[in-house]
Amino acid sequence: MTKFGPKASEKVGKAMHEMKEGTLKSGSNGEKVTSKKQAVAIGLSEARREGGKVPKK
């Protein structure tokens, strides 16, 4: 059984793309995201918010 659904992989991919372009910003202070781990976390968080299949934090 897979841990993550298609919505999650789509969101993470989009967040990684935005990070590489330099347009991904963190939510709390609005600074540019430079870490891959942070980009993945943002993507998973967005997928969670939209009801995608993502394990709990």
Image: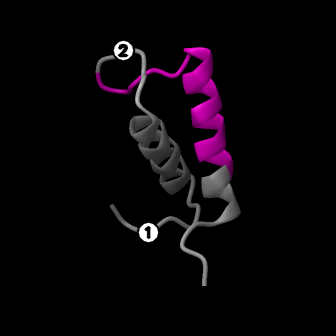
- Counting labels gives 2
User: Secondary structure beneath disc 2?
Assistant: loop
Amino acid at pointer 2: Glu
Above or below, 20 relative to 14: above
Name the residue rendered at 36%, 14% in the picture. Answer: 31
Is residue 15 one of those drawn in magenta?
Answer: yes
Above or below residue 55? Residue 1 is below
Crowd around label 1: few <14 · some 14–19 · many ≥20 (10 Å): few
Q: How far apart are marks 1 and 2 (CA)?
A: 27 Å
Quadrant of the rendering where the C terminus is positioned = bottom left
Q: Where is residue 40 in the image (x, y as percent from the top left)?
A: 48, 44
Q: What stretch is highlighted in magenta?
A: 10-28
Judging by the rendered image, the residue that carries numbered circle 1 is 55
Q: Residue at x 57, y 52 (%)?
A: 50
Instruction: Name the side, left or right, on which 40 lies relative to 28.
Output: right
Find the residue positioned furthest to the bottom.
1
Q: Is there a contact, CB below 8 Å, between mark 1 and mark 2?
A: no
Front-most of residues 17 and 7: 17
Percent x, y for residue 14? 65, 36
**Disc 2 marks which residue?**
31
Predominant secondary structure in magenta?
Answer: helix
Mark 1 and mark 2 lie on one chain; the one further toward the N terminus is: 2
Q: Position of residue 43 (x, y in %)?
A: 52, 43
Is 24 a magenta residue?
A: yes
Q: Which residue is drawn at 45% across and 48% down?
A: 45
Residue 49 or residue 40, whichever sits in front? 40
Residue 52: % across, % down: 59, 61
Amino acid type at mark 1: Pro
Find numbered disc 1 in the image and state the secondary structure of the residue it sits on: loop
| Residue 2 found in image quarter | bottom right
